[in-house]
Image (cartoon, grey):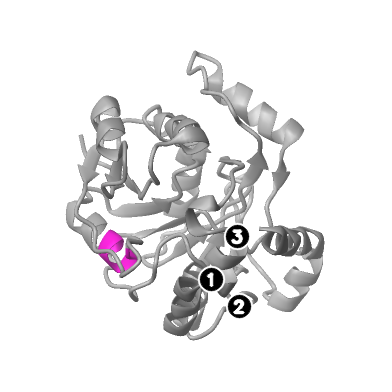
Amino acid sequence: MTKRLTIFAVPKAFEGHADIIQRNAITSWTFLPDDIEVILLGNDAGVKEIADELGVQHLPNLKRNDLGTPMLDSVFQLAHQHASAPTMMYLNSDIILNRSIEGMLDAIEGTAAKQFLAIGQRRDFDQNEPLNFDAEWEQRIEAKAERHGTFASILCKDYFVFPSSMYQTIPAFSIGRGNWDSWMVANSVEQGIPVFDVTDQLFAGHQNHDHNHAGGRAKAYVTGAEAKQNKKLAGGTNYVSGSVATHKINAKGQIQRINRIPLLSFVWDFPKWFGLVIKLIRG
C-alpha cells in the first residue's frame, strides 16, 4: 500500500509511568489508517520490544552526545532514509492520536503547498492507567481530554508535520531539551515557508508526566548544558518568533492567514506560559 504519512518518534525507556503512557500513545498510532506508517528510533529499554509487539519499524542506531542523549540530526536523517511517505511527522511518544489525523492531512493537502510546517497545541490531561482499546476508545479519550484537560501553552510543541523534502539535515540538537522546537518554526518563517496551526483539526492528547529523566523541567529546557547548547545552535531561544504560525486551518478545513504579531499571541497566552514557568521553577 502506498503510504501517506510517516510518523517517527524516539521513546524513552519503558519504565514506570513512562511505560504506561508511551504504550498508550504508540498503540493509538497503530489504530490509524493503514496508509500511515510508524517508525520508532533508539535503543532505550523496551523500545525494540514494543516495536516488535506492535509490528512497527524500529531503527536502533542513533548518534548520541557525551551525556548519552540521542541527537536530533541523527533522528531526522535516519527517519528520512527509511520513510516511505511524502509527508512526515515527528511526534513525541506520549501523544495519543486518533482518526482526526485524516482530516488534518486532507486539509494540508488541500492547500497545495509544496513546502510547509504544521504545528498545533496539545491537550494536557492525567492518564495513569493503560487504555482499553475497544470500539469506543477514540471518543472516550477525546471526551476525557476535553472534560478534564487543558490546552497547553503555545510554547509547547509536540509534533511537526512537513514534506519529506524538508528537514533532511538539521543542527545537532539534543532531543528532549529546550530551544530546538522553537527553532523549527522560526527557521521556516525566516525562509518564507508557511506554518500551519492545525490545532482545530488534530486531536493531540498529551498524558502528563514528570521530567526526572532529564533532571527536572528547568534543567531540561533552560539551565542544563544540553539546553544551552541547543540554544547556541538555534541562534537563541526563539520563544516568541518560534511559537506562532503564519496560517490557521480551522475545523472546517479552511485556511486563514494569521495577522502574525507574535508578541500579542504571547500576551494572550500569558496564563498558560506563566503556569509553565512556575512548573519549570518547581522542577
Q: Which residue corresponds to the image point at 30% horizontal and 27% vertical from the top-left?
A: 54
* Disc with the residue nearer the chain's start (3 vs 1): 1
Q: For the residue marked with disc 1, what is the amino acid?
A: Ser
Q: For the residue marked with disc 2, what is the amino acid?
A: Ser
Tell me, yes or no, if residue 166 can be seen here. no
Q: Nearer the viewer, mark 3 or mark 1?
A: 3
* Disc with the residue nearer the chain's start (3 vs 2): 3
Cα separation, mark 3 vs mark 2, equals: 22 Å
Q: Which residue corresponds to the image point at 45% horizontal and 72% vertical from the top-left?
A: 226
Vertical comparison of 241 with 19: above or below? below
CA neighbours of label 1 inside 10 A, class few (<14), some (14 to 19), many (20+): many
What is the number of the mark on residue 61? Answer: none
The part of the image, by quadrant, that contains residue 150 is: top right
Report the residue marked by disc 2.
241
The span shown in magenta is: 71-76
Residue 247 position within the rendered picture, expressed as x and y whole percent measured from the top left: 59, 65
Task: Please give left or right for residue 35 compared with residue 161 in the image.
Answer: left
Report the residue marked by disc 1.
182
Q: Which residue corresponds to the image point at 43% horizontal and 65% vertical from the top-left?
A: 116
Quadrant of the snapshot with the N terminus: top left
Cα separation, mark 3 vs mark 1, equals: 16 Å
Q: Are marks 3 and 1 in contact (CB under 8 Å)?
A: no
Say which element carries label 2. Answer: loop
What is the number of the mark on residue 217? Answer: 3
Q: Are marks 1 and 2 in contact (CB under 8 Å)?
A: yes
Residue 6 position within the rendered picture, expressed as x and y whole percent measured from the top left: 31, 47
Taking depth in this image into account, of 52 and 158 the one nearest to the observer is 52
CA neighbours of label 3 inside 10 A, class few (<14), some (14 to 19), many (20+): many
Q: For the residue marked with disc 3, what is the amino acid?
A: Arg
In magenta stretch: residue 73: yes
Specify the principal SS of the magenta part.
helix
Q: Which residue corresponds to the image point at 27% horizontal and 68% vertical from the top-left?
A: 168
